[in-house]
């Protein structure tokens, strides 16, 4: 394999963001007067459902409560705006090895991409929080969940990233933190390195080509 690109998942891979997402959901639910609140255990379980709107729909079915279906997209937009506000307050740090890996990738002439279930706006918020730069200055390609019909573990978002990179799967390497993400990358034909996050520590990542505690020990050569 001639490596030409690195493709990153976002939440849990670039940074431990899920607690900020959980807070943003709960703040949005409270502001909307929904009476919903996701504690840590509930949110951990709901993460098995990929996509924020999909999690809200799953919770509405489970509890028999919540907003009408046509309200969920607007509610999710409000949640995304709140998430960006939370990240802008500061304190978010990249996971170990991420800054070095991105820098080494650039120095080696590799292209950098994102393949994520989250929205482009959330990628932008995270990139500005970590690098203090727009996402387009860090990543050559961003493939996001709302741009495909099916989310991880379906490979659609990885296939979209590969099309935008104009590369075959054999010339890229994926980085993930969750079982759904690993399965999506593998189904797209990619080699994948997994480093579980705080919220995915219990996931079965055995389908990955390598599983590491974090990416601090990973080297491109």
Image (spheres, rainbow, N blue to C red):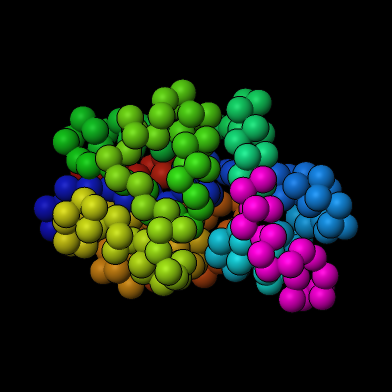
Residue 94 visible to the viewer: no
Residue 79 visible to the viewer: yes
Write the start and end of the magenta stretch as one range: 60-78
Residue at image location 62% in from the left, 48% down from the top: 77
Q: Main secondary structure of the magenta part?
A: helix
Residue 207 in the magenta stretch? The answer is no
Q: Position of residue 95 (x, y in %)?
A: 50, 39
Residue at image location 46% in from the left, 23% down from the top: 132
Say which quarter of the image contains residue 45. Answer: bottom right
Q: Position of residue 161 (x, y in %)?
A: 29, 55
Residue at image location 51% in from the left, 52% down from the top: 118
**Closest to the observer: 196 or 173?**
173
**Closest to the observer: 176 or 89?**
89
* Above or below for 137 versus 173: above
Q: Residue furthest front?
A: 70
**Closest to the observer: 96 or 148?**
148
Q: Position of residue 71 (x, y in %)?
A: 69, 60
| Quadrant where the image shows the C terminus | top left
Is 163 displayed left or right of 210 in the figure?
left
């Amino acid at each position: 394999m001639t490596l030409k690109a690195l493709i990153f998942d976002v939440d849990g891979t670039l940074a431990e963001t899920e607690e900020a997402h959980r807070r943003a959901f709960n703040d949005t639910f409270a502001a909307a007067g929904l009476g919903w609140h996701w504690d840590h255990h509930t949110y951990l379980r709901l993460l098995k459902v990929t996509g924020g709107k999909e999690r809200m729909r799953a919770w509405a079915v489970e509890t028999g409560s919540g907003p009408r279906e046509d309200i969920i997209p607007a509610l999710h937009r409000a949640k995304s705006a709140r998430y960006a506000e939370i990240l802008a307050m500061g304190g978010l740090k990249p996971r170990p090895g991420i800054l070095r890996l991105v820098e080494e990738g650039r120095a080696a002439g590799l292209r950098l991409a994102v393949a994520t279930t989250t929205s482009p706006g959330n990628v932008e918020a995270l990139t500005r929080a970590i690098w203090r730069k727009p996402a387009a200055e860090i990543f050559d390609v961003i493939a996001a969940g709302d741009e495909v019909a099916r989310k991880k573990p379906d490979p659609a978002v990885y296939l979209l990233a590969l099309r935008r990179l104009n590369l075959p799967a054999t010339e890229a390497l994926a980085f993930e933190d969750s079982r759904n993400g690993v399965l999506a990358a593998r189904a797209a034909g990619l080699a994948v390195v997994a480093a579980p996050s705080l919220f995915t520590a219990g996931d079965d990542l055995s389908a990955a080509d390598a599983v590491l505690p974090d990416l601090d020990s990973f080297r491109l050569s």
